[in-house]
Structures are given as C-alpha cells and as structure tokens.
Image (tube, coloured by chain):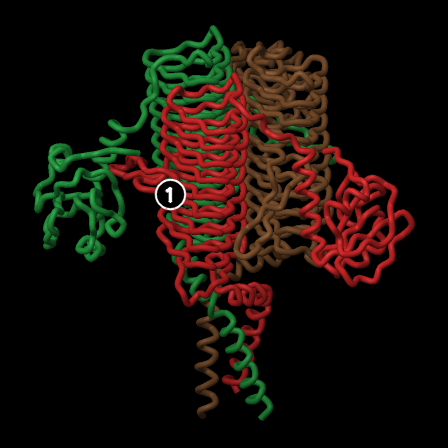
Chain colours: A red, B green, C brown
Amino acid sequence: MKFSYELDELVDLLVPKKVVGHTSFPISHIESLTKTKEGGISFLGNPKYKKDAAISQASVILLPMGLDLTPKANQCFLLFDNPSLALGKLCRDIEEKYCPHPIVGTHPKAIIDATVSIGQNVSIGPNVVIEANSTIADNVVIMAGCYIGHDVKIGDNSVLYPSVKVMDFCEIGSRVTLFSGAVIGSDGFGYETVDDIHEKVPQIGNVIIEDDVDIGANTTIDRARFSHTKIGKGTKIDNLVQIGHNVIIGSGCLIVAQTGIAGSTTIGNHVVIGGQVGIAGHLNIPDGVMIAGKSSVANYKPKMGKILRGNPTMPINDANLFYVLRSRIPNLFDRVLKVEESLRELLSK
Amino acid sequence: MKFSYELDELVDLLVPKKVVGHTSFPISHIESLTKTKEGGISFLGNPKYKKDAAISQASVILLPMGLDLTPKANQCFLLFDNPSLALGKLCRDIEEKYCPHPIVGTHPKAIIDATVSIGQNVSIGPNVVIEANSTIADNVVIMAGCYIGHDVKIGDNSVLYPSVKVMDFCEIGSRVTLFSGAVIGSDGFGYETVDDIHEKVPQIGNVIIEDDVDIGANTTIDRARFSHTKIGKGTKIDNLVQIGHNVIIGSGCLIVAQTGIAGSTTIGNHVVIGGQVGIAGHLNIPDGVMIAGKSSVANYKPKMGKILRGNPTMPINDANLFYVLRSRIPNLFDRVLKVEESLRELLSK
Amino acid sequence: MKFSYELDELVDLLVPKKVVGHTSFPISHIESLTKTKEGGISFLGNPKYKKDAAISQASVILLPMGLDLTPKANQCFLLFDNPSLALGKLCRDIEEKYCPHPIVGTHPKAIIDATVSIGQNVSIGPNVVIEANSTIADNVVIMAGCYIGHDVKIGDNSVLYPSVKVMDFCEIGSRVTLFSGAVIGSDGFGYETVDDIHEKVPQIGNVIIEDDVDIGANTTIDRARFSHTKIGKGTKIDNLVQIGHNVIIGSGCLIVAQTGIAGSTTIGNHVVIGGQVGIAGHLNIPDGVMIAGKSSVANYKPKMGKILRGNPTMPINDANLFYVLRSRIPNLFDRVLKVEESLRELLSK
C-alpha cells in the first residue's frame, strides 16, 4: 500500500507531547525499529528495545516520554505517553485514507430474492446470493461471492468478506465482521447409530452471533440441533476455529486459531482460549478462565483454578512444574535403580 | 425458524403410548427442560434429569414410560418407550414442513458445459460451474457457487452445500452430503527434494466417496498420487478435517472435527476418531478401533488394543493411569529424595 | 482418468536400461504392486517389497537394476537406476496428455475492473472477480470463483484453483500455486483490550508470497499489522494451515497440514514442520530445524538442537526417551513404594 505523510501532517494528526529533531523525508512505510529505512516510521513499544531505537534508520520514531535519546541528522522523535496508541491512530488514518472502500449499492451481478429487505447505504458485491425473506440492515457490506440463506438477519454495520456462507435462519448482530470463507450455520455433527448405521439427527436450530463479534477466515460454526448455537457480544474468534452445535459462548471472549469446541459446551464471559485448544462437549467453563495454547480440556472443576494448561489440562503451575520435571524423569529412574542396589547390598550384609 | 403445532397434531404425529394432562398453547419452540417456556416442547432423554422435568415450564414434555410425574396446569406429558426418537420424528417433520427446499431445475446463472449429463429432478443453484464430461445423477442438489471439475461423477440424491469444490475425475456416490467449503480432490502434498529444491510429484489419482458419506464444512480430502483416496460407505466426517492423499477409510467410521490423517494410511471399518486427532502416514488402523480426541497415533500394533489415547497413543487404561500419576510426579521426586537421604544416613552409621 | 499406453510407447517415453519379457496389454492404470491387475503398471521403490513384485499381477513393473526376478507370461519388467523417477516421468506425461488444461482467455462471466493489467496467455475462469489496479502477469491461471482484491500482484505462471481469495495489496510471486479455498491476506488477530472491550488494531500490512511457493486448500495466511507477512521462495505449505500476521518464513520450508504459526514468529530456511504443530508467537526458529508432528513449540534455544518433538518440544532423543519411560512410570511408583517399605523395615530393626 502506498501512502505518504509529511512531518507536519504527522504532528497535526498524532499531537505528540514533544517533538525532538526534524526530518525532510515524507513518511511512506512503517516497520520495526531495526528494519525501517529512510522515509520510514517506527515506534518503541517496550523500553527494553531502547538500543534498537538508538541505531534505527527510521526518519520518524514514536517514543515514550522521558527517554534520553538524541535523534540523528534528518531524524525526528515524537514523544507520547503511549507510543503504541499513537501508532494505532496513524494506522487507522492510513486505513481510512488509503485502503479501498466498498461501493454503496448492489452490484448488477448479485442475485437477490425479491423478498429480501435491504437497509440504507448497503454495499453488495458481485456474485453474492441472498435467498428469500432475509433482512440486511443499514450500512452492511457483503463482499463478492457471499451466500446468505433463507430468513437470515444481518445487523447494521456488519461486514462480510468474500465467500462467507451464512445458512438459513441464522442471525448476525450489529458491527459483526465475518472473514473470508467462514461458514455460519452448517449442520452439527449429530448421528444416532442403529445397527451400525449412523442415522443423521436433524439439525433444525440456528446460530446467533451477537453484536461486535469477529469470526476468522475459514472458521466453521455449526447450527444447533434445536434452539441456538450462540456467540456472545464482543467475542473475537480467529481463523480455522470449529464451534460445535449448541455451544454457548459468553461475551468478550478471545479464541485463537484452530481451536475446537465440541457440542453443547458452555463458555462464560471473558474467557481466553489459546490456539489449537480442544474442549470436550457438554462442559461448563466459567467466566474469566484462561487456557494455554495446544491444551485439551476433558473436564473442568473449580479447584482447577482459572489458568489451565496441558493435555489434558491441569492448573497452570502444576503443568509448568510437570514440564520441568519431565526432562528429569530419566535421571529419576537412574536414582531409583541406585537406591535399589544400595538397599540390596545393605540387606545382603 | 417459525413453526407451530397444536397438541392434537403432535399426538397424531408422534403417537405416544400415553397422554397425561393437556395444554392449550400451540407449540412453537424446542428447548432443554430448564430453558423451555410456555409454548415450548422439551424432552427427558436421561432419567437422571428427572428433577429438571419436574420444574420445567415447557407446555409439552416427552417422557419415558413409567416416570411418576404429574403435569402442572396447562401442561401435557407425552410418554414413549424412547422420547429421544420421538423428538427426532418431530424435528424431521419440522424440517420437512418448515425448512426451505431447493428448487428443481438449473438456475439461469449456473455455468454448465454442454457435455455435462444431468439426471431427473436435479437442482442447480446460481453461480455453479460444472466442467466438461461430468455426470450428475437424479435428485442431486448443487447449491450456489459450487465448482464441479471435469469428468466428475455425482450419484443420485447427493447434496452439495454452497461453495463446495469437487476437482477433476473425482467420484461421489449416492446420498452423499458435502457441506459448505469442502474441497474434494485438491492435490496431495507430495514433493521430491533434489538439491534442496522441493519438486512437485504429479498427483494424477482421484478421490472416491462411496454412498451415504457426509463431509463437513471446510474439510479437505486430497486426490491420490495415482489410483484413489477413498472414503467408505456410510462414513461421517466432521468440519475442518484433513485427509491426505491415498488414504483409504473403511465403512461406517466417525471422524470428528479438525482431525488429520496423513498420506497412505488405511483406516478399517467402524473406526471412531475423536476431534483434533493426528494419525501419521502409512499406518494400518484395524476395524473397530476408537481413538480419544487430541491423541496422536505414531504407529499401531495389535497389542495396543482397540481403545487408544495419548500423545503418542497408549492403550486407554495406560493413558488414564498416566494422567492420574502425572500430578503425583512432583511428590515422587520428593519421596525419592527422602529415601536417598535415609539411605545415606544408614550407610554413614 | 482414462489413459492408455502400449508397451512400445512406454519404452520410448521412459528409456529403461533393460527390458525383460513382453506384454500385449495396453497400460491403463497405475497401482501398488499388490493391487495392480492386468493392464496395470506398478513399481518397486523399496527393495524390501521384492516379494510383492514376484507375485504382482501388473502387466508392466518398473524395477531397479540388478534384481533377479523373472517376469510371468505376458508380463514385462522395465529396469532403471531409479524406478521412482521413471514413474514420475510417466505421471507427468499422463498429466500433460490426459488432464484437462485451462482455456486461455477471460471467461465472459468474469468480472474484472477496467484498471486491471493482464499479461499474455492468461486464463481467467467464470465468476472470477478482480478489483481495481491489480496486475496479472503472463501465463497465469485463475480458476472459477476466485476473488482478487485491489492492488494485488500475481507473478507469471502462477495457478489459483477455484475459490481462492487474495485480499488487497498482497503480492504473489511467479510459479506459485494457491489451492482451493486458500485465503491470503485476511486481517491478523490483533486487539487492544481497554476496559474489557477488545478494540481491533488496524491491519494495514500485506502478505508477500515469493516464487515457487505452494499453499494448500483452505489454508489461511494473515496480512501484517503493518509491513509484511512473508512466505519465502520454494516453501511448500499443506492444507488447513494457519499463518499469523507478521510471520516471516524462509525459503525451501515444508509445512504439513493443520499446523499453526502465531504472529511475529520468524522461521528460517529449509525448516520442516510436521502436521498439527503449534508454534507460539514472537519466536525465532533457525535454519534447518525439524519439528515432529503434533508438537508445540513454546520457545526455542540453540541447545535444543535441530530436531524437536513433544508438547512442549524437547530435543527429539529426550522426547523419545520420555515416551518410552512414560509407560514404566506406574512401575516406578511401585518400586519407590517397595524401597520405602524396605527402608522402614531396616530402620525399625
């Protein structure tokens, strides 16, 4: 992406507490301190990287107040209470000014049933299909190739990236982002096995995604057997995650990539789940629990505490201790063998 | 989904062994016993939840015969040998009557090569692409945006949800369901490394999916290097599963989400594989083996028995014992230290 | 796939060092030694399967020089220094002659912005969408339903299978293959949590995929927060892999299915990563490291050596030793108990 900011523009935009030095280079790239070159901007998020700032070739560096560094020739330091927030502000400005914005209106190659209700200021891309009786609220963006089933509701200001699928009867809240390839409302994995034949259990529930949720690319969220699979307000889910049927997830959770949650499990509010975690079905994970990446949760009891790790999970301190001792186990076998030999000698005397 | 059943209709449909009490509410939702409200129906699948039935606000409850509970005012109990089967019957009726059904015929925005053979009563949605020489049997449903390559065969009564990809030369049986985003017949991951360069090994085989198979959303099944990758009759595969090239899976297996099976492994009949399991390549897993979720199978020998767990897998009893002892290992180190000290004292006497 | 080779054609194509015996069957399938039938060709890659060659029903078998086997009636042996390479040559010939080739030109149902630059000999399938200012070099194949965002560059001779998504500003090199459903350049999973609300951090970087890279089906590679997520030259990535934002992967790596690499981690050159591996964020994995399948890498230090295994990873010999001892741990508990009892007896004397 090409962008360009003169030093004056940056100062006007970010309003630093202090400006030290000056640069004549327009700023056209953002990089880490050691990779930035002339015309680049960088930032010091963590004081332990102060050395990197001292040798950085960046033309502009965002620094925390109180750092005793002197800019080189043609280099400018902008000082803030929180340089990371200042960088975020710049990134949002770049996004606003330099990233392409969806075109309001329905592309002529979209295929939309006559019964669909579409709000104000909606953008619908080419090859989008929207089936009967669905409702699209104001300011929604539905990008190329998305499929919206029958009787779907999509709340205002939500964004669907290319090739998202939202199946019949699902409900998407406001300000929800669904990234490319996500499948919302595919059938749950439910079978009754009679005489070795797996007969499908009908999956007639839906998925409800509350406001301010993000769902990552190629993530799959299954519809309920009946009633609802639910993702609570403000929860953020990463790529390639699997959410089973009838799972209920609370608000404000973070679920990292490739995690799987089996059917009918309930997750509380503000739960944080690392990547590649597996959680068994029919469990109840309370508010505020944190689960380390690659863990598997076979059950949960309050005495396990709030931070879990392991396969299957233990309280994190137990898990960390086990991982330390694990490498000393060969030595423990040797020690026990020596003890046995000593004892045998003692006893034979 | 909106539906409505008067009590009379329910009784006619489900034919209970006994009717106790009466309700005037039409039934318009299904929920668990503790969540159901007026106008709702629920069921008691497991007698241990009898307490929930006693306090449920459901207007109709499906119960097993022989339960001594009395309905509240305006509440009706329907008694069955198997209430779960009765609920299944109701769900299938709702599916039949209230879920949208695909429209027979080819959507004008489908793009189908002139050489494609299409059976009777087929439904092909918008933006579907079918390449030359493919054959689509009777009663097949291919939903929006699917891609069917060259020389593909799809058997009767199969259903392809939106955006399924079936690549050249693959063969899909009868009554197969492929859920959204599944990729059938992508190239296997095969390279020969010569002088540090990974040269691609041509993947000219195909994928054969036998009758009555389900394949989950965003699952990927790779085509064989040559000959076939094969999924046996009646096997059900969940979402985000990876099946490598030349894998042969028997009939009646269940494979839960996010599992991966590496190339050239053979899986017998009626094998059950939990979620997030990894199975190495070139293995032979015999009929009836069960593998607990999150396990990894590095090899298989008959003495391991039929139920496996762990990373890498052990016989399940060994794995369960290890997981119990694991938390006592710190204590074992302490005990060995004490023993060593005692011995040292004894020897110094 | 149907193909047919007379023995003469095979000899002309493969140029064996020696021909023993003769077959009149035209060759129309390739299979393993024990599964091949009349009219089939097979090969002996590993001398330990010599027995299989002796009983094989294949009409033609590719064998290593110096094997003292005699063909049956109507069976022909073709001898090579490397029979596996000869088979590869045959497979490439079949691919060339019998697999469908993309049609050069832009399908009338593709939707391409007027500002897009398209090279010579390019094939663009139906329902492809290419947004403004993108550049497609010579000999590129973009199959049905792909989405190419704004300002994307795709290098010459690259192939995009159906329904690949390449988001705004990403850069794809030459001879790159992106398999079906891959998502290149979705937003990284970055939030700042303020008062329990997860606020999205703008993701304004891109993804750069260098020359000769393959990316598997339904794999997701996130765009950088700023600057680049990068996949180095000649690296091959399997299906359903997750690459986080700002990850830098070197050249010539192999990354097997369902592996996940968290944000800002750097992977060196010629690193080999097994299936279902998890690698934490902000790590630095040096050149030539190999990581066994299902492992999780929480950190890396040079003393760990170059081959890692375990959850979390250990040097592979330590991991293998631990897995052997793991099954003897119950016995170790018994031994320590006996030792304690003996000691108690001794001390009580």
Instruction: Please state the total of marks drawn on the protein image.
Output: 1
Image x and y of residue C100, in percent: 57, 14
Between B209 and A201, the residue placed more toward the observer is A201
Helix, strand or loop under label 1: strand
Quarter occupied by the N terminus of chain B: top left
Residue A266 vs residue C308: left or right? left
Whether residue C63 can be seen here:
no
In the rendered image, the vertical position of residue C274 relative to residue B244, given as above or below: below
Image x and y of residue B228, in percent: 48, 25
Residue type highlighted by circle 1: Thr
Between C216 and A169, the residue placed more toward the observer is A169
Q: Residue furthest top?
A: B114
Between A201 and B110, the residue placed more toward the observer is B110
Residue at image position (10%, 51%) is B66
Between B112 and B135, the residue placed more toward the observer is B112
Q: Quadrant of residue B41?
A: top left
- In the picture of the structure, the residue carrying the numbered disc 1 is A229
Residue at image position (23%, 47%) is B37
Whether residue C67 can be seen here:
yes
In the rendered image, the vertical position of residue B191 relative to residue B349, given as above or below: above
Residue B247 vs residue B50: left or right? right
